[in-house]
Image (spheres, rainbow, N blue to C red):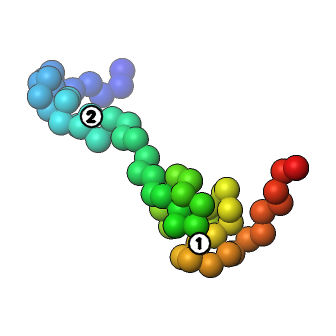
Amino acid sequence: MPPLPKRKHSKGRRDRRRAHDSIRPSALVTCTNCGEKHLPHRVCPNCGHYAGREVIEIEKKA
């Protein structure tokens, strides 16, 4: 037989273990060039700017 716990863990102990399991909404910042929301410290997927300069060239849809 596999090892089993000697005593039941309390609900408080169980809930403290699960305190970090909740999902938080991701933080979004506004692009200084186009005003779209994007993840912080990432290139804007809409315009390709990062830190005030164009990093990647984005093709515009016609």
Q: Residues within 10 Å of mark 2 (few under 14, many from 20)?
A: few
Report if the CB atoms under discs 1 and 2 are less than 8 Å apart.
no
User: Between disc 1 and disc 2, whose residue precedes?
Assistant: 2
Q: Is residue 42 left or right of residue 3?
A: right
User: Which residue is rendered at x = 58% and y = 67% of the image?
Assistant: 33
Q: Is residue 5 visible?
A: yes
Give the amino acid type for the residue marked by disc 2 in the picture. Answer: Arg
The relative height of residue 41 versus residue 20 in the rendered view (above or below) is below
- Secondary structure of the residue carrying tag 2 is helix
Q: Which residue is mark 2?
A: 18
Relative vertical location of residue 27 with respect to residue 10 in this rendering, above or below: below
Residue at left offset 45%, top offset 52%: 28
Residue designated by label 1: 50
**Residue 3 at x, y = what percent?**
30, 28
- Nearer-the-camera pick, 25 or 14: 25
- 9 on left or right of 47: left
**Image x and y of residue 43, in percent:** 61, 65
User: Callout 1: helix, strand or loop?
Assistant: strand
Q: Is residue 7 left or right of residue 18?
A: left
Quarter occupied by the N terminus: top left
